[in-house]
């Protein structure tokens, strides 16, 4: 449906190559989304989070897991772990991704270690790729929101969460919380043009 980091990259490329204004809108299957490019920093306004479901209990191979689910443009299921480094993201991620509880569309799976309320570490198994990826924008948004939803008696209206990814990049997630839920969600981080190529459209 859409890709948060992909959206940031497309926005940077368009603004850099077309030399257009820094604020643009991009149409995705999840809706028309706004992007702001400031040099190599790109932030995009994400879709309104939906389908929030906390404390879903899964039985996998005789073990019980408690996960949480949210759609941030695409579906994500979040599992909090104590040892993120040694978690078998590929094996467990694949099982949850295809779990009957999330069919027919399936789900991305995010494994999260919380440092504190403003900093979390993330590894993601992405559907479609069917493996772990180095960073996931919609996953960063999903985990930031779920981690906040788990905070006891938190009265803050605005949040800023740093999400540390496997690539080493830090994605910043900004959003607001009210009685109705979460809104005004932004994903920010760096994007770079790393190479260019030419495609020959001539007849073979």
Image: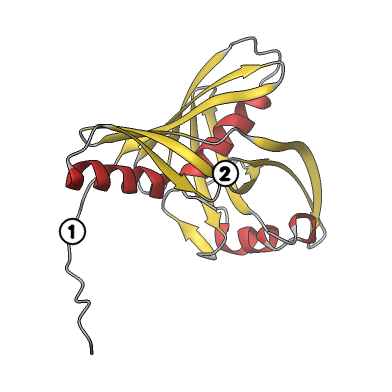
Report crowding for label 2: few under 14, some 14 to 19, many 20 or more residues within 10 A (C-alpha): many
Residue 173 image point, x, y percent: 46, 29
Q: Quadrant of the C terminus?
A: bottom left
Residue 42 image point, x, y percent: 32, 35
Q: CA distance from mark 1 to mark 2?
A: 28 Å
Instruction: Give the numbered dot on residue 73.
Output: 2
Nearer to me, 170 or 203? 203
In the drawing, does residue 45 fall left or right of residue 10? right
Residue at horizontal 38 percent and vertical 33 percent from the top: 188
Residue at horizontal 33 percent and vertical 48 percent from the top: 10
Report crowding for label 1: few under 14, some 14 to 19, many 20 or more residues within 10 A (C-alpha): few
Q: Secondary structure at mark 2?
A: loop
Give the image quarter of residue 70.
top right
Residue at horizontal 54 percent and vertical 46 percent from the top: 84
Q: Residue furthest bottom?
A: 204
Q: Residue furthest top?
A: 155
> In the image, which is nearer the foreground, mark 1 or mark 2?
2
Residue 5 image point, x, y percent: 40, 46
Residue 115 image point, x, y percent: 51, 29
Give the image quarter of residue 114.
top right
Sequence-first tag of 1 and 2:
2
Instruction: Give the numbered dot on residue 56.
Output: none
Q: Secondary structure at mark 1?
A: loop
In the drawing, does residue 194 fall left or right of residue 1? left
Q: Does 160 sit above or below residue 142?
A: above
Look at mark 1 in the image and give the residue it sits on.
195
Give the image quarter of residue 18.
top left
Nearer to me, 203 or 138? 203
Residue at horizontal 70 percent and vertical 13 percent from the top: 153
**Colour scheme shown:** secondary structure
Nearer to me, 150 or 104? 104
């Amino acid at each position: 449906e859409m890709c948060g980091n992909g959206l940031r990259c497309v926005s940077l490329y368009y603004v850099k190559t077309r030399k257009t204004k820094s604020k643009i809108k991009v149409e995705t299957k999840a809706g028309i989304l706004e992007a702001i490019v400031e040099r190599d920093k790109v932030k995009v306004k994400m879709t309104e989070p939906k389908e929030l479901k906390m404390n879903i209990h899964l039985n996998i191979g005789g073990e019980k897991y408690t996960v949480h689910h949210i759609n941030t443009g695409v579906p994500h299921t979040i599992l909090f772990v104590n040892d993120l480094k040694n978690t078998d993201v590929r094996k467990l991620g694949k099982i949850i991704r295809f779990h009957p509880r999330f069919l027919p569309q399936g789900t991305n799976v995010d494994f999260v270690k919380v440092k504190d309320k403003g900093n979390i570490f993330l590894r993601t198994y992405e559907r479609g790729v069917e493996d772990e990826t180095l960073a996931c924008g919609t996953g960063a948004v999903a985990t930031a929101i779920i981690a906040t939803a788990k905070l006891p008696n938190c009265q803050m209206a605005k949040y800023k969460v740093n999400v540390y990814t496997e690539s080493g990049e830090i994605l910043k997630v900004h959003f607001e919380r009210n009685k109705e839920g979460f809104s005004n969600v932004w994903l920010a981080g760096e994007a770079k043009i790393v190479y260019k190529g030419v495609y020959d459209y001539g007849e073979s």
